[in-house]
Image: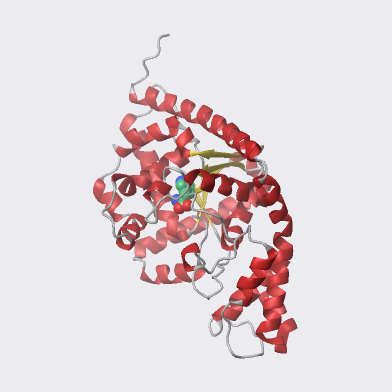
């Protein structure tokens, strides 16, 4: 998930970033705020593209970190495009897993939380050949040292025991194709994904510089901006980063019982008096934050209410808050899961729309590159 920004990671990054990195972060943040302000009145000017690798069921960190924001943008009237990145997930160090099931399960999560296929185009990489073909001219516009400097490529490489594949090295360029094929001008991202967006802007700019504009008057590609997430970061039930591999996640699609069980096991501390102290009591603060996000209240107000009720009361509150917030979503999830035909139709329609746009863009690219050989 890309657009989950983690506030504490952000702080560390800002401190260690070079001056130019942090000033470009500041610039991206200013720009992002401007766009946010503009969105409310002028949503029609924006096309958003974002997406996820199909790695399995989404959790409530994904929900509050990015899905809820996508639904908000959709409701504002932003033209929304969402890629299920099935060609990107094959670079994952943990392997692909049962890909078809994972793609469909991701789609179920999307639809259950309120993404509406009539307004949000949901598609898969593998079904859109013209998108993938953009990768070839784009690859000619980047250097291997540029790619080796990409922080995500670097950290994936460091975390993986495997040698780096060509696709892993070049996946930021593939991601540029995701964004540019539909000429998206905004991309909701967390800070960690800013280098990808910068790479995308570089590709767009160089394409224009290299191929002029052919017979076309305007640049083929816009330079997309980041829409930086200000979402709070939810930790897992053990107080570390929420992640499937750590077994500390609350999945969107979990049953109420399973939710109660995992919250019961959540790490807290021995102080019975519940206070909101993110620095001193991060695990307790995280549970309070979760209750707050689900109920639209502040963590502080929950802490005041629970007071001497201790961890037991705190966990009961959180369980109730999570289960009632997600009950309708879980109900829709179950209905959607029972109708795979519907899911496949939604995907087919999204893929058809993505293909039409991708082919039109590829035509412009061929034209600009002097590669249009159609008979008149
Ligand atoms: N990289 C994203 C992830 O890790 C998925 C993704 C693929 C994406 N293409 C994208 C995100 C384009 C934003 C824009 O889940």
Q: Quadrant of residue 372?
A: top left
Q: Is residue 51 above or below residue 135?
A: below
In depth, the one of 15 and 334 nearer the eye is 334
Question: Where residue 370 sits: x, y (%)?
Answer: 33, 21
State the residue in front, 10 or 244.
Answer: 244
Left or right: where 176 falls relative to 121: left
Where does residue 73 sit, x and y in percent of width and height? 63, 49
Q: Position of residue 291 (x, y in %)?
A: 68, 71
Would residue 52 appear left or right of 288 to someone viewing this image? left
Q: Residue at x 67, y 42 (%)?
A: 116
Q: Is residue 264 visible in this depiction of the protein?
A: yes
Question: Residue 304 at x, y = what percent?
Answer: 72, 83
Q: Nearer the viewer, residue 107 or 195?
A: 107
Q: In the picture provided, is 274 more to the left or to the right than 136?
A: right
**Quick check: 308 above or below 260?**
below
Q: Residue at x 51, y 40 (%)?
A: 184
Residue 47 vertical placement versus 233 (above, below): above
Q: Quadrant of the C terminus?
A: top left
Q: Is residue 296 visible?
A: no
């Amino acid at each position: 998930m890309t657009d989950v920004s983690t506030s504490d990671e952000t702080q560390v990054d800002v401190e260690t970033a070079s001056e130019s990195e942090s000033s470009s972060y500041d610039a991206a943040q200013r720009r992002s705020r401007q766009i946010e302000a503009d969105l409310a009145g002028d949503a029609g000017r924006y096309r958003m593209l974002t997406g996820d690798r199909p790695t399995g069921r989404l959790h409530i960190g994904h929900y509050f970190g990015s899905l809820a924001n996508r639904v908000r943008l959709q409701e504002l009237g932003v033209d929304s495009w969402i890629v299920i990145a099935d060609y990107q997930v094959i670079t994952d160090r943990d392997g692909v897993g049962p890909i078809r099931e994972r793609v469909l399960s991701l789609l179920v999560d999307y639809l259950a939380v309120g993404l509406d296929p009539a307004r949000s185009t949901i598609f898969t990489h593998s079904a859109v050949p013209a998108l993938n073909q953009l990768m070839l001219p784009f690859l000619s516009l980047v250097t291997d040292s540029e790619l080796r400097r990409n922080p995500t490529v670097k950290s994936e490489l460091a975390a993986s025991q495997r040698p780096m594949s060509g696709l892993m090295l070049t996946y930021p360029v593939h991601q540029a194709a995701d964004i540019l094929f539909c000429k998206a001008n905004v991309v909701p991202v967390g800070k960690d994904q800013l280098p990808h967006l910068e790479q995308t802007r570089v590709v767009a700019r160089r394409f224009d510089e290299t191929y002029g504009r052919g017979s076309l008057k305007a640049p083929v590609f816009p330079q997309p901006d980041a829409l930086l997430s200000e979402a709070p970061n939810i930790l897992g039930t053990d107080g570390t980063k929420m992640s499937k591999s750590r077994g500390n996640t609350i999945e969107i699609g979990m049953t109420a019982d399973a939710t109660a069980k995992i919250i019961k096991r959540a790490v807290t501390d021995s102080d019975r008096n519940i206070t909101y102290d993110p620095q001193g009591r991060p695990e307790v603060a995280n549970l309070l934050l979760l209750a707050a996000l689900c109920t639209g209240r502040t963590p502080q107000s929950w802490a005041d209410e629970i007071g001497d009720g201790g961890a037991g009361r705190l966990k009961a509150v959180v369980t109730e808050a999570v289960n009632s917030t997600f009950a309708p979503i879980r109900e829709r999830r179950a209905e959607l899961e029972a109708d795979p035909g519907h899911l496949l139709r939604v995907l087919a329609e999204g893929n058809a729309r993505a293909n039409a746009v991708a082919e039109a863009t590829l035509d412009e690219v061929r034209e600009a590159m002097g590669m249009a050989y159609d008979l008149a």
